[in-house]
Amino acid sequence: MNDKYRHLFFDLDHTLWDFEANARATLLTLYDSLGLKARGVHDFELFYRNYLVHNDKLWERYRNGYVKQEELRVKRMWLSLLDFKIADDKLSKEMSDQFLDMLPTRNLLFPYTKEILEYLSGKNYQLHLITNGFEKTQHSKLKYSGLAVFFEKVITSEGSNSLKPNKEIFEFAFQQTGARPEESIMIGDTIDVDILGAVNAGIDQVHVNHLTKEPVPVSEETLPTYTVYSLKELEAIF
């Protein structure tokens, strides 16, 4: 056990829970059930890739306070349809509603997710989540993927009224868990959200680089304390 750390704060989406794979499976179901090909979406893979781009951009705008939760949820569908010259508000809303119902029930995880959580729990670390996702959605993901049992506290942006990389969500997490910064570490996939947020909060960080690309730090200060390219590599740190 790494004696420096007692509280391990994980990100959920893109770190443990494979958002891209789960989103793809859900969108493919909607593509078939809503007859999107007949409506003019001639290429599912292009639709899916465009969705990911729109989703990422809208989440950045959401983090910066430019769009609201409901606008994010519907607009990512509306823009993805508009790429195929389909301007249909009703269809966008229907897709958004069904997507949000189905997505959290998916259970595709990154390799070694449950094994590493069992390993860390067995070493008596206290495991928590800090996620920018919405309260109901994130708890559903944890339930259906079988991850809920591993985490003592789940801190969401909705529940904390803050978002990573703002330090306030981490301060809220410290209050909820009783953790001190010097005994805490953040484990996440995104440099400008998870790593920068942890830097802002004064805690160490592990960058989980599933993409095996060189991280692009926002500044000198956001070079992560550790970088791993698979979850199994966390065993070398903890």
Image (cartoon, grey):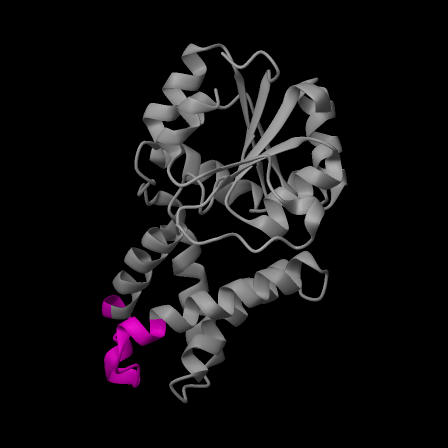
Residue 176 x/y as whole percent: 69, 24
What main secondary structure does the magenta stretch of the protein show?
Answer: helix
* Image: 34 above or below 105: below
Residue 172 x/y as whole percent: 73, 32
Residue 171 seen: yes
Residue at image coords 35%, 68%: 48
* Image: 148 above or below 160: above
Q: Is residue 68 left or right of residue 101?
A: right
In the image, residue 44 lies in the stretch drawn in magenta: yes
* Image: 230 above or below 32: above
Q: Is residue 184 left or right of residue 142?
A: right
Q: Is residue 232 left or right of residue 59?
A: left
Residue 159 x/y as whole percent: 66, 38
In the image, residue 87 lies in the stretch drawn in magenta: no
Quarter where residue 31 is shown? bottom left
Is 66 or 5 nearer to us in this picture? 5
Q: Which residues are magenta?
A: 32-47
